[in-house]
Structures are given as C-alpha cells and as structure tokens.
C-alpha cells in the first residue's frame, strides 16, 4: 500500500480527493520535493562550468538521462533530450521530421500537442491522414496501416487516449512502421511510468512524454528520446555550453535539441521520482491504479443517465474513466463534485477535439476521473457515491 | 608558480559525454578528474578529463570497453 498523502491539501469542508492524475500527479513521493529543495540549494548551471556547483547539476542531469534510457530502452543516455513538457518534445519531433510534401498518419485519439503541430505542418505543405475509431473509441493497428501509402513519412500516435484511457497496441503499430520503412513517433504522456514502453522492442523512433504525470516528477520537465540513426534538426538554437565559437547548433545529441539552460531543479526531482518508480515497480503502480479504476467503474456503471466512454473490455487500459450524466454540462458536474464533495476531476474537451467529435461529446464534454496509486479504496467509494447522488437528481 | 606536469587530456563534443566519462572513471578507479579545457586545445565541450600521463592504458581500456564517446586524447603539460 502506498503512503496515504491525500490529506495534504484541505478542500472546503471535505478532505480532498484528487482524481485528476491524468492532468498532473499531485501526489508524489516525498523524495521528489526533497530533491528539488536540495537542488535549489546546491545547483549551479549544468554544462556551464567545471566548479562543484555546476558539476553537481551536470551529474544529476546525466544520472536522470541514464535512468530514462534504462526505463525506455533509448539505447544510450546521449539519445535522451530534456524539454519543458511533452508538447515541446512533440513539436521538436513533428516539425523536425515532417516536411512539405511528406504524408503523415495519425489518429482521432490525439491530444492537441500532437494535432496542432501536425496541422501546422499540413499548412506548410505536408499531407495528413487521420485514422478513425469505433464507437468505443478504439483505433486498431490495421486501421492505421490502411492509411499508409507511398510518400508516408511517419505515423504519429498516442499510446493511450487522455479521454477514454483506451490503449493503442504500439508494438503492433511499430512493427508495421518498421516493415513499411517509416518513422514511428509516440506520445506516451498518459503511459510513461505506468505502462512498460521499450523503444527497441516497440520499434519506436521518437518517444515523447512529460515528467509530471505518471513519472511523478515536477511540472516543467519533459523528454524526447530519439533512436540512434534518427536525426532531428533543432526547433530552437542557442547556448549549450559547448562549441561556443560555432555559428550553428551542435549536431551531437542531446546538445542539438537542448538550447538554453535546462530545468535542473525539476530534473533533480524527476531523478528522484524515477528512483522511486524503479524501486516501487511500475507493474505494481499500474495494477494498483487499474484496480481503483475498476472499482470506480463498477460503482457507476449501469446508473440511470450515466454514460461511460471508452473500451472497458480491454483489461490493459489506462487508469481513466470519463462519463457524462444525462445531457448535463460536464463542467457543472465537475464543479459540483469539487465544491460539494471535495472530489477534483477535469471536465470539458481535454484538448482532444477529434476524440470528442468521435464520441459525440463535442458540446457536452466529459467528466474525467483519473487515478493515482496513492488514492485509496475509500476515496473511490466516495467518488462513486457522489455520482450516484448526482445521477438520481 | 604551481608546478606543471604532463597529463593526458581527453576532450569531448558534449557535456553528456564528459559526464559519462566521469561516471565510468569513478566506478573503475581512474585517478583523474574533470577540468576546464586547456586554452591550447580546441574542443567542443568546455569540460575535459585530466588523467596522469602514466594512466594511458587504463584510460584507453575504459574508453573502448565502455564505448565512451570522446573527441581526442592529448598528452600535454598543464
């Protein structure tokens, strides 16, 4: 059982129940804040000196690269670049690898962090095909493969929908991409730290994710892992602490993609959370969160007026349950849950417009419950009881 | 004036390569440490590894055995 950290922040008259971990991890192991605090008191600027303060920062950042490399099978630490978030990582990958005249395949499951860079490249002359889903929000590897044609440069695909929690079989998609000789770019924002992802076994060329969701690190940390042999030109150029007299950005990874000072303090926190995850075990985290998700699903499924979105027949789904009550505004439900029950969820469109159009929830949005292994069974019961009350109004 | 001595100076393209060298050097008991790149040397990265001149064999074994990325190894008086 994970340490109960749920009462750290009071919410009105109720102890707070945070069920918005797909947006960001609020509950983190204490070692994360301790590491950030230690870094604030000891870090110089990484790669900008040879004194102990600078080296202390450089060592921790290097250790974090090693941990990420090990966790995701990135090959070597040099192939791991730090960014501010998954959106920056995806922009670097998509704007750097998709050119005018290229064809690219993606899915209706995608977050705007994927869609908007793709639309930008479409405006610049790339062609975009979007794979549709079935009524339960599922996208199959076969449906993606049907869209691949001569001139297809890449498939860009989320590992799991941030709206439904449905998981895409990235290993099968990766195998298709390798067989067809095209790049495979994966957005693992909802799965990094929860599901095993291995760039070698899953045939992933570029893996993008944030550090503050399933990886339990601080906000302002993100990552871009690039397979050896794939070269991405920089989206931004500037200081790296290396090759100072060169007029152009260094070509070597990770400096090629890391212009400007890195978020060393945040990365120190991420290093601590990665250590925690390797000790606690992501399989244990996933099964714990999935058990809480199933408990909640069981508590609300079949209630009058309650519609659940997504594929709940698949046992290996991300720990997310999105629902609506009748035709009531999802924002109103989420607000009542927060104000009257102390239950914090997310409502609205979740930055995934195509997913909502496919589910028929573009106007209403959906109330999303997403779970942390720090949540307790009692908290889940409170949340399902609240939905029962609201559904009976 | 401080005494100068002959050292092996390893230069790198990136800070990440230098940190990998330091991490490996610590584990295997190399005698050296990271220093600012001597001004007589042109290198991409501002960090260099400085090793006693007698440590060439251990240094080269470490670099090849662990596939460490580096720019050059230079013997020089610093």
Image: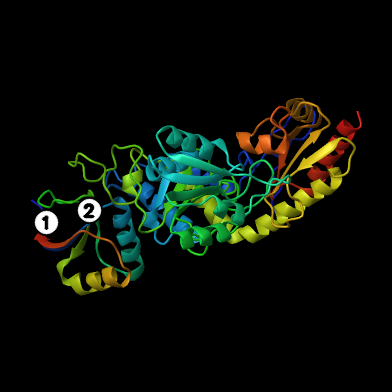
Gap in angstroms between the C-alphas marked 2 and 1:
11 Å
Along the line of sight, which residue is nearer the eye, A41 or A141? Answer: A141
Q: Quadrant of the C terminus of chain A?
A: top right
Q: Position of residue A171 (x, y in %)?
A: 56, 60
Q: Quadrant of the N terminus of chain A?
A: bottom right
Q: Do residues under tags 2 and 1 come within 8 Å of each other at their CB atoms?
A: yes
* Residue under label 1: B78
Q: Is residue A372 above or below residue B18?
A: above
The residue sitting at 81% across, 31% down in the picture is A341
Tell which circle, 2 or 1, labels the residue nearer the N-terminal end: 2
Visible in this render: residue A18?
no
- Graded by Cα atoms within 10 Å as few (under 14), some (14 to 19) or many (20 or more), the crowding at tag 1 reads some
- Graded by Cα atoms within 10 Å as few (under 14), some (14 to 19) or many (20 or more), the crowding at tag 2 reads some
The residue sitting at 88% across, 44% down in the picture is A302
Relative to residue B6, is residue B36 drawn left or right? right
Chain designation of label 1: B
Along the line of sight, which residue is nearer the eye, A85 or B12? Answer: A85
Along the line of sight, which residue is nearer the eye, A97 or A347? Answer: A97
Q: Position of residue B6 (x, y in %)?
A: 11, 63
Q: Secondary structure at mark 1?
A: loop
Chain designation of label 2: B
* Residue under label 2: B35
The residue sitting at 65% across, 42% down in the picture is A21
Q: Position of residue B28 (x, y in %)?
A: 33, 70
Q: Is residue A105 above or below residue A359?
A: below
The residue sitting at 71% across, 38% down in the picture is A359
Q: Position of residue A309 (x, y in %)?
A: 75, 42
Residue A96, image quadrant:
top left
């Amino acid at each position: 059982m994970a340490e109960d950290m749920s009462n750290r922040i009071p919410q009105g008259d109720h102890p707070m129940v945070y069920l918005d971990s797909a947006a960001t991890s609020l509950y983190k192991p204490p070692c994360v804040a301790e590491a950030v605090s230690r870094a604030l008191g000891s870090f110089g600027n990484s790669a900008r000196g040879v004194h102990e303060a600078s080296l202390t920062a450089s060592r921790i950042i290097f250790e974090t690269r090693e941990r990420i490399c090990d966790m995701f099978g990135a090959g070597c630490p040099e192939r791991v670049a730090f960014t501010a978030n998954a959106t920056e990582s995806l922009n670097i990958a998509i704007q750097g690898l998709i050119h005018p005249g290229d064809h690219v395949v993606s899915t209706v499951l995608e977050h705007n962090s994927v869609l908007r860079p793709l639309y930008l490249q479409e405006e610049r002359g790339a062609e975009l095909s979007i794979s549709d889903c079935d009524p339960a929000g599922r996208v199959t590897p076969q449906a993606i493969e049907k869209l691949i044609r001569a001139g297809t440069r890449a498939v860009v695909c989320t590992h799991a929908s941030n709206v439904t929690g449905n998981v895409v079989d990235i290993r099968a998609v990766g195998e298709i991409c390798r067989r067809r000789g095209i790049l495979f770019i994966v957005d693992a924002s909802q799965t990094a730290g929860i599901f095993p992802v291995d760039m070698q076994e899953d045939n992933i060329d570029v893996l993008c994710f944030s550090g503050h969701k399933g990886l339990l690190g601080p906000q302002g940390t993100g990552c871009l892992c690039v397979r050896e042999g794939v070269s991405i030109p920089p989206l931004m150029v500037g200081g790296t602490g290396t090759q100072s007299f060169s007029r152009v950005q260094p070509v070597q990874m990770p400096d090629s993609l890391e212009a400007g000072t890195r978020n060393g303090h945040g990365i120190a926190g991420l290093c601590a959370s990665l250590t925690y995850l390797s000790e606690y075990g992501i399989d244990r985290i996933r099964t714990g969160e999935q058990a809480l998700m199933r408990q909640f699903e069981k508590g609300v499924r079949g209630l009058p007026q309650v519609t659940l979105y997504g594929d709940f027949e698949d046992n290996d789904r991300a720990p997310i349950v999105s629902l609506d009550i009748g035709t009531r505004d999802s924002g109103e439900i989420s607000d009542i849950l927060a104000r009257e029950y102390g239950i914090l969820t997310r409502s609205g469109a979740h930055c995934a417009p195509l997913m909502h159009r496919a589910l028929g929830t573009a106007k209403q949005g959906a109330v999303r419950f997403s779970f942390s292994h720090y949540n307790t069974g009692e908290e889940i019961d409170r949340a399902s009881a609240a939905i029962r009350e609201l559904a009976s109004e | 004036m401080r005494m100068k001595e002959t050292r092996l100076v390893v230069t790198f393209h990136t800070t990440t390569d230098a940190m990998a060298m330091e991490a490996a050097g610590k584990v295997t008991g190399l005698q050296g440490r990271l220093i600012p790149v001597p001004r007589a040397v042109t290198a991409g990265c501002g960090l260099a590894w400085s090793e006693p001149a007698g440590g060439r064999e251990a240094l080269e074994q470490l670099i090849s055995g662990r596939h460490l990325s580096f720019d050059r190894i230079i013997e020089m008086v610093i």
